[in-house]
Image (cartoon, rainbow, N blue to C red):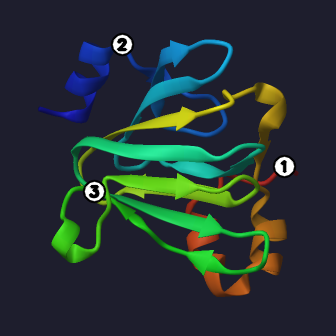
Amino acid sequence: MTGPEVAALLGLAPLPHEGGMWAQTWIDEHSTAIYFLLQPGDFSAMHRLDGTELWHHYAGDPVRMLLLHPDGTVSRPVLGDDLAAGQRPCVVVPEGAWMGAATAGEWSLTGTTMAPGYTEEGFDLGVRSDLATRYPEAAAEIAALTREEPA
């Protein structure tokens, strides 16, 4: 399969601002869940949420993630199914951590789950210069996982 075939089969649409392609799979008063597809040339832009988010790997290539924690530490988990190589099928993104992600190959089908559920008010998109100043050791990765800064 190809990324566009996966997107068509699951009815995925481009996700504005953050990037990637998505579709809501569950929503109720307690939780939300989505499918999320990453393909080359696109990425999940650095953002943070007001709740903990679980990322799950479903199919395709692994996903390289960058997590910038409020205490100043940086982690680089890889979401995937090669456990012996250190990949994990589920990665927890703690509340308030900045995170971005990109496929390590041709396409990666993931999903995310939040409880309590996602809200637009709880989403902040990262600004490259601000994040690079706070986390200088990850500046190159931050540049690769952010979009153009406003003029």
- Residue sitting farthest toward the front: 30
Which residue is at 84% across, 30% downward?
A: 121
Local secondary structure at mark 1: loop
Which residue is at 23% across, 49% downward?
A: 106
* Residue 5 appears left or right of 57: left
The picture places residue 144, in percent across and down from the top left corner, at 55, 64
Residue 80 marker: 3
- Residue sitting farthest toward the bottom: 137
Kind of residue sitting beneath label 2: Gly
Residue 17 marker: none
Residue 150 marker: 1
Residue 11 marker: 2
Which residue is at 49% across, 73% downward?
A: 76
Local secondary structure at mark 3: loop
Which quadrant is home to the N terminus? top left
Spatial CA span between label 1 and label 3: 34 Å
Q: Say which of 16 and 33 sits in front.
A: 33
Mark 2 or mark 1: name the one nearer the start of the chain. Answer: 2
- Residue sitting farthest toward the right: 151
Q: Say which of 36 and 105 sits in front.
A: 36
Spatial CA span between label 2 and label 3: 23 Å
